Image (tube, rainbow, N blue to C red):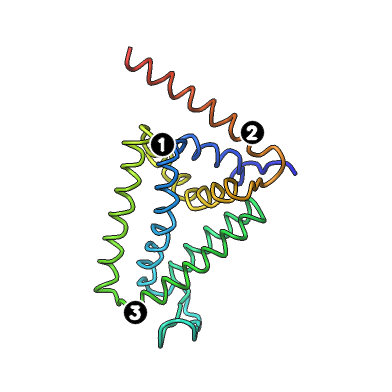
Amino acid sequence: MGKSKGLFDLEKHFAFYGAYHSDPVNILIHVLFVWPIFYTSLLLFHYTPPLLRLPCLPLPLLAAGAHLHVNFAFVFAAVYALFYVAMDRKAGSLAALLCALCWLGSGSLAVRLGFSLGWKVVLAAQLFCWTGQFIGHGVFEKRAPALLDNLTQALLMAPFFVLLEILQKFFGYEPYPGFQSRVSAMIDADRKEWQASKQKKVS
């Protein structure tokens, strides 16, 4: 299987994000904090008004009286899920399932908390998780986060990146043969260029 091109070029996206995450401690920090950032973002977006006036979705497994509307939370989760599936059918489907579970879970929690408490929980969680990630970059990676160079790509790729890291490390997963070696070569080239740029600035 060949790699995807353009917007759905998985090698390019993974190499870009991977070039900023080579330190094991920094990678672990991202594994722990990236999905909670996604989850709590969804939690806040559940308080947005419906985008479409469609019947709400009653889900008996959620909090009593909870209904999930087609609002910005739904669109946010759907965009991420579809983007991941488009890049890699197998791992992307798993990521899409996680996006759906986050959407369901955050919707239930949004009902339980209510907006007056919910936004405070989101703020505390986001501050904690983002602080942890900046510490990971500043103290361990010693390189500015990817979002400073490409905000959209970094935020969109982050949840899928950490999932691929886990699948690769513990299950030896590759989207297709040769993926890991090509990505590693791209990451090495990027980091060498970055190191050379740092040396020029110092000298």
Mark 3 sits on what residue?
112
Quadrant of residue 142 within the rendered picture: top left
In depth, the one of 69 and 108 nearer the eye is 108
Name the element at disc 2: helix
Image position of 140 with respect to 161: above or below: above
- The single residue placed furthest to the front in the displayed view is 170
Mark 2 sits on what residue?
182
Going from the N terminus, do you reach mark 3 or mark 1 first?
3
- The location of residue 38, given as percent across then percent down, is 42, 59
Q: CA distance from mark 3 to mark 2?
A: 46 Å
Mark 1 sits on what residue?
149
Image position of 112 with respect to 147: above or below: below
Quadrant of residue 187 within the rendered picture: top right
The residue positioned 62% from the left and 60% from the top of the image is 93
Quarter the C terminus occupies:
top left
- The location of residue 168, given as percent across then percent down, is 60, 46
Name the element at disc 3: helix
Amino acid on which disc 2 is placed: Arg
The residue positioned 26% from the left and 60% from the top of the image is 124
